[in-house]
């Protein structure tokens, strides 16, 4: 995985340098869609076929993204395809988001919850988490019923686990020690 990160870094940095002169959020949405498409094994197999041109791969990707792409994103994707780095596109997009978030002073927070969280509850949770982590957070919520109750939050390499499952594990360790 370190190899993909190494390949992705210069692409992400160049992409961010161009995107920040325009609309970073719009670019990020388009890149997310393209990263999702690039993650498909069948598409990568299609792209690896020597009988398929780079332009054909681009056309399939842009059609699968299901949204119009700005010229800068189109040029970027064409360059990635031409250089045979399509497999690294999701890592490039991930690093692009990290650069954009760092510049905006925002961090991604992945919130895992046992139950759905409505908008008002999410706003309260994010407010508390922003105080706890000391920075602005962009929250992404995923349901994880195995937590039984509570939430688990991942911000970068920091984890805050207040789930029932984690509490039960701590009790188990304390009782068996």
Image (spheres, grey):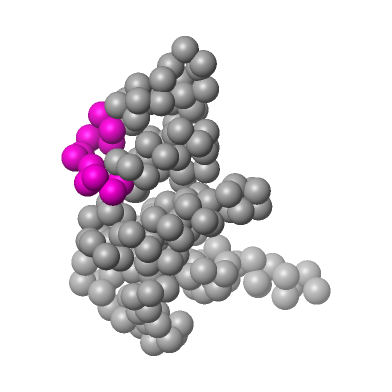
Q: Quadrant of residue 121?
A: bottom left
* Location of residue 64 in the rendering, given as x and y in whole percent from the top left corner: 29, 30
- 66 within the magenta span: yes
As drawn, is 176 to the left or to the right of 79? right
Up-down relation of residue 89 to residue 43 (above or below)? below
Q: In this view of the protein, can residue 146 be seen by the observer?
A: no
Residue at image location 65% in from the left, 72% down from the top = 171
The quadrant where residue 78 appears: top left
Classify 56 as above or below 61.
above
Q: Please state the total of marks drawn on the protein image.
A: 0
Q: Residue at x 30, y 41 (%)?
A: 74
Q: Which residues are magenta?
A: 62-73
In this rendered view, identify the residue nearer to me: 100 or 112: 100
Q: Quadrant of residue 104?
A: bottom left
Residue depicted at 37% across the width and 78% down the height: 105
- The residue furthest right is 177
Residue 5 appears anywhere in the view: yes
* Residue farthest top in this picture: 51
x and y percentages locating residue 82 in the rendered image: 46, 33
Which of 160 and 34 lies nearest the eye of the viewer? 34
The quadrant in which the C terminus is found is: bottom right
Q: Measured along the vertical axis of the image, is residue 17 above or below residue 142?
A: below
Q: Is residue 65 magenta?
A: yes
State the residue at coordinates (31%, 55%).
Answer: 28
Relative image position of residue 23 (x, y in whole percent): 22, 61
């Amino acid at each position: 995985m370190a190899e993909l990160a190494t390949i992705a870094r210069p692409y992400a940095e160049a992409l961010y340098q161009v995107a920040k002169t325009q609309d970073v959020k719009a670019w990020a949405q388009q890149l997310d869609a393209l990263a999702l498409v690039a993650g498909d094994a069948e598409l990568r197999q299609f792209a690896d076929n020597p009988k398929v041109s780079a332009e054909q791969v681009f056309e399939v990707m842009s059609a699968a993204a299901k949204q119009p792409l700005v010229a800068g994103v189109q040029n970027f994707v064409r360059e990635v395809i031409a250089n045979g780095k399509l497999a690294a596109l999701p890592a490039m997009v991930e690093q692009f988001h990290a650069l954009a978030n760092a510049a905006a002073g925002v961090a991604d927070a992945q919130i895992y919850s046992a139950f759905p969280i409505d908008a008002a509850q999410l706003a309260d949770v994010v407010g508390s988490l922003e105080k706890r982590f000391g920075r602005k957070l962009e929250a992404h919520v995923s349901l994880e019923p195995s937590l039984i109750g509570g939430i688990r939050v991942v911000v970068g390499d920091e984890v805050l686990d207040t789930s029932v499952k984690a509490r039960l594990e701590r009790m188990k360790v304390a009782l068996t020690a």
